[in-house]
Image: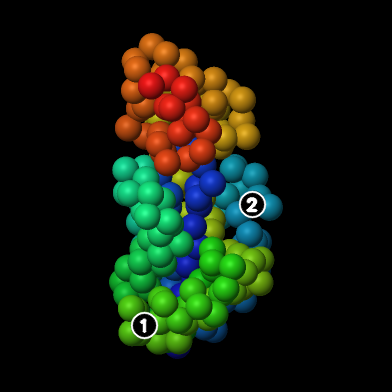
């Protein structure tokens, strides 16, 4: 039986894409994920994540990565539908991978409601939705590594031309980059999420 894990990376970031990734693997091979050292991507160094990325791809039956650009994120945030946007993309991933059971990391305060929403749209296999799924289920840990590596690579691309720090609003380097860009160009770069509170504050202060 095929089992699927789905997770996101970059949800809290003020710039770059929100990445949703999923893997599908034969149930009997899940223990192999644990054996190679798969765990929640946040507990791993970038170097280790890169190493595990290739090992995971060797073990899985399939994988799928979806990147949600800032413009799409802003549109959903303006309607207070970020959780729904994430769920819709998780549905895309689950449909692609066609597993008998899919484990998802819920971004909704109510994991049951989140799982039900996905189940009604995906109409494929069983959906198991929970908080901290990336810590509980190796299939979701593996998906979290795939998501994080793809997210890191997207930020790395931007870094080639911009000194933008980690991309998170708590990073002074990131916020300094955005402020300087704003004062020099009068607008935000396309890769910045304009719906995030610190960015909105900057935009309203300049208007």
Q: Is residue 44 visible?
A: yes
Report the side of 29 relative to 87 (left or right).
right
The residue that appears at 40% across and 36% down in the rendered structure is: 194
Q: Residue 145, image x and y in percent?
A: 54, 56
Q: Earlier in the sequence, mark 2 or mark 1?
A: 2
Q: Residue 181, image x and y in percent?
A: 41, 18
Q: For the N terminus, which image quadrant?
A: bottom left
Q: Residue 113, image x and y in percent?
A: 50, 78
Report the side of 160 relative to 10 (left or right).
left
Q: For the C terminus, which image quadrant?
A: top left
**Display coloring:** rainbow
SS at mark 2 in the image? helix
Q: Is residue 54 visible?
A: no
Q: Which residue is mark 2?
A: 42
Q: Quadrant of residue 141?
A: bottom right
Q: Quadrant of residue 172?
A: top right
Whole-number angstrom distance, CA of label 2 to CA of label 1: 30 Å
Q: Which callout, 2 or 1, points to the residue nearer the camera? A: 1
Q: Which mark is residue 120?
A: 1
Q: Residue 91, image x and y in percent?
A: 36, 71
């Amino acid at each position: 039986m095929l089992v699927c894990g789905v997770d996101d990376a970059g949800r809290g970031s003020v710039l770059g894409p929100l990445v949703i990734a999923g893997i599908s693997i034969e149930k009997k091979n899940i223990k192999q994920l644990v054996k190679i050292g798969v765990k929640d991507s946040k507990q791993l160094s970038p170097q280790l994540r890169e190493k595990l990325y290739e090992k995971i791809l060797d073990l899985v039956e399939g994988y799928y990565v979806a990147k949600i650009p800032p413009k799409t994120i802003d549109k959903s945030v303006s309607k207070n539908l970020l959780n729904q946007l994430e769920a819709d993309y998780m549905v895309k991933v689950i449909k692609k991978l066609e597993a008998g059971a899919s484990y998802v990391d819920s971004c909704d305060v109510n994991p049951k409601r989140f799982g039900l929403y996905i189940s009604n749209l995906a109409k494929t296999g069983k959906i198991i939705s929970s908080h901290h799924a990336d810590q509980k289920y190796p299939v979701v840990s593996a998906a979290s590594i795939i998501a994080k590596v793809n997210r890191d690579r997207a930020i790395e691309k931007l870094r080639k031309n911009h000194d933008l720090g980690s991309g998170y609003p708590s990073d002074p380097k990131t916020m300094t980059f955005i402020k300087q860009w704003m004062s020099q160009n009068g607008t935000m770069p396309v890769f910045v999420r304009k719906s995030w509170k610190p960015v909105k504050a900057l935009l309203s202060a300049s208007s």
